[in-house]
Image (tube, rainbow, N blue to C red):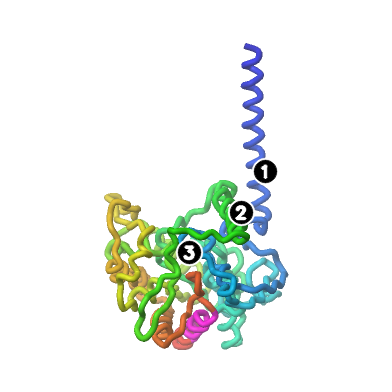
Amino acid sequence: MARLSRLLLAFLYLISGILLGLLLLEGILRCNATLLQRGLAWPAPVDPPLTVSNYDVRYSDADAFYWRPDLIHPVPEPDNRLEARVTYETDEYGFRNPAPISPRVDAVVLGRSISLAGHISEPWPDLLARRFNWRVFNLSQPGSGVKVKDLLLERFGLSRQPRWVIVEVVPSIDILGNHTAPKFISQQMFVPVVQGLLRRQMEEKPIATDQAIYPLRVDLPEREVDLTCCLHYLDFFSLDTQSLSQSQDWANYSQELLNIIDTARASDACVALLYVPTKPDVYFPLAQHPEQLNPSLREAIPYRLNSDGRIEPSPGEDISVDLVRQNALAGHDLVESFAREHDLVWIDPNDAMTQSVLEGQDPFMVYDSHWNQLGHSIVAEAVIQALSKATCP
């Protein structure tokens, strides 16, 4: 009996120690956001302040390798070309801006990794600043949903009295994303840490797999492309505009967008929504032989609207390339209608990106769904044109 009591006491000590350790870890991570992997720091910036880094980005550095390396053929070393030479500078808060931040700015940018663009030297906010001679405060952070954008605007942006607040919109991620604050940062760390460790191993020993489908050869008008894309977008394109508009997910997301709009307007700022074209938006509708895209759907799980008005996975149902092509702009059209309804400036680079592909160019990274330098130049021009025509007191 005494032995059992000692074992129970030891077990209680062990559990108490684990819980205290997790609480200590949680406190450390919340106070030191730069210790976290990208995407886990909420709502603080993830880069240390006042730094300048120089590095190269090659094909094999793409996010696609980080998430699903089993679907992508390893890049042979002779073909692992240089995609960009990057100079990355952080301001006094850890955001990607030259320091110091001016007490007053012309525009605040709220985005994800797309507008942060750690893989190129001049993301579109920098191009906008140079073209207009503006002071642009880029508050973009990896993985930041609309709720985080609102918090970053209130915490860092509004005190700079911006004339414009430009909100990056990615319907395929934003509408179905989790818009509430995570209760515990530490519980989110397990999967990213394991992925990071595995990635280091794979960089040392690239793994060939019979399951790999990318790069996927696709015929476009007048040329062929080797397409690597869509690893976390395709499920969304099983939904049409009507299903999206009737969902509770859209109701929640649009309400959170309205919170940002109301917050910005209460500080006399004008608001613009920047639509983010993705590879499926651009390349899928252009495919001359849609059946060539069929392998990309192998891992896709379609969504449906359930009886509670929530969008949920529906593994038993099929998703086809024709359905994806048909719904490629469903989210785009829904958010555009929202922008018109609420008198927001709508910035849409989709047609310009599609035209660049038809002209033989590619505005995306080769092994990744993020825009390359050409893509950011196209987006900057779309932003410049839209804001030049807009009326903002």
> Residue 238, position in %: x, y?
31, 62
Q: Which is more N-terminal, label 3 or label 1?
A: 1
Checking the image for residue 72, the label placed there is 3
- Looking at numbered disc 1 in the image, what kind of residue is underneath it? Leu
Residue 382: in magenta span: yes
Q: In the picture, which quadrant includes the N terminus?
A: top right
Checking the image for residue 24, the label placed there is 1
- Under tag 1, what secondary structure? helix
* Residue 58 in which image quadrant: bottom right
Depicted 260 relative to depicted 224: above or below: above
- Looking at numbered disc 3 in the image, what kind of residue is underneath it? Ile
Q: Mark 2 sits on what residue?
A: 197
Magenta-highlighted residues: 373-384
Q: Nearer the viewer, residue 34 or 99?
A: 34
Depicted 102 relative to depicted 308: above or below: below
Of labels 1 and 2, the one closer to you: 2
Q: How many marks?
A: 3
Q: Which is more N-terminal, label 2 or label 3?
A: 3
